[in-house]
């Protein structure tokens, strides 16, 4: 299993960034490897079932990866816990935290994952970890873009 820990400062209020992160349908617009993301069902109490499809490029190989996750959004502490429901990954879970800092938001993204694709050996799995690490960076940059666009359209 691989663990990725990322942080990024976004110069917008925490509630605005939290709200932007909940807009999963917007992420394919800003993430080149993400083909689709959609809310499948709203279970109430901030819990959403979301479905994702991405193209994982590892060296010369390319593999479509699909998964369904449960996103548990907690408005009171501006956090989200996500966990794999089903899909191509063996393990995929983690959390988002949004905290006020320096007039903006410090976003924490923690992801634990294991692809579980039998054809990938240890060396390719390490490359896949690097790709996932880069994807997490792109996810934070994408969140910044979505939040900035929403802030711009709100005022």
Image: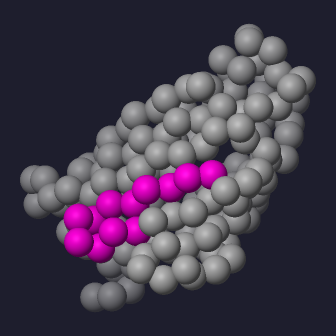
Residue 126 higher or lower than 148, as above or below: above
The magenta stretch spans residue 82: yes
Which residue occupies 57% across, 63% down?
70
Say which quadrant the C terminus sits in.
bottom left
Residue that appears at 66% across and 17% down:
126
Q: Left of 118 or right of it: where is 144? A: left
Q: Is residue 93 visible?
A: yes
Residue 17 lies, with reference to residue 43, above or below; the image says above
Residue 38 in picture, x, y percent from top left: 67, 73
Residue 26: image location, x then y, percent: 57, 71
Expressed as whole percent of the image width and height from the top left, the position of residue 119 reads 89, 24
Quick check: 147 above or below 118?
below
Quarter of the figure with residue 39: bottom right
The residue positioned 40% from the left and 34% from the top of the image is 5
- Mostly what secondary structure, the magenta segment? strand
139 sits to left or right of 79? right
* Residue at screen point 82% across, 31% down: 117
Q: Find the magenta span and give its range.
A: 73-84
């Amino acid at each position: 299993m691989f663990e990725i820990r990322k942080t990024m400062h976004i110069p917008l209020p925490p509630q605005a960034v939290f709200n932007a992160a909940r807009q999963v349908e917007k992420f394919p617009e800003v993430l080149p490897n993400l083909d689709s993301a959609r809310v499948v069902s709203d279970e109430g109490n901030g819990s959403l079932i979301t479905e994702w499809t991405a193209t994982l490029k590892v060296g010369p190989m390319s593999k479509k990866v699909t998964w369904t996750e449960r996103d548990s959004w907690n408005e009171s502490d501006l956090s989200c816990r996500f966990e794999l429901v089903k899909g191509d990954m063996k393990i995929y879970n983690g959390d988002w935290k949004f905290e006020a800092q320096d007039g903006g938001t410090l976003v924490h993204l923690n992801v634990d994952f294991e692809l579980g694709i039998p054809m990938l050996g240890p060396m390719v799995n390490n490359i896949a970890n690097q790709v996932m690490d880069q994807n997490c960076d792109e996810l934070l940059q994408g969140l910044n873009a979505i939040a900035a666009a929403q802030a711009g359209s709100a005022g």
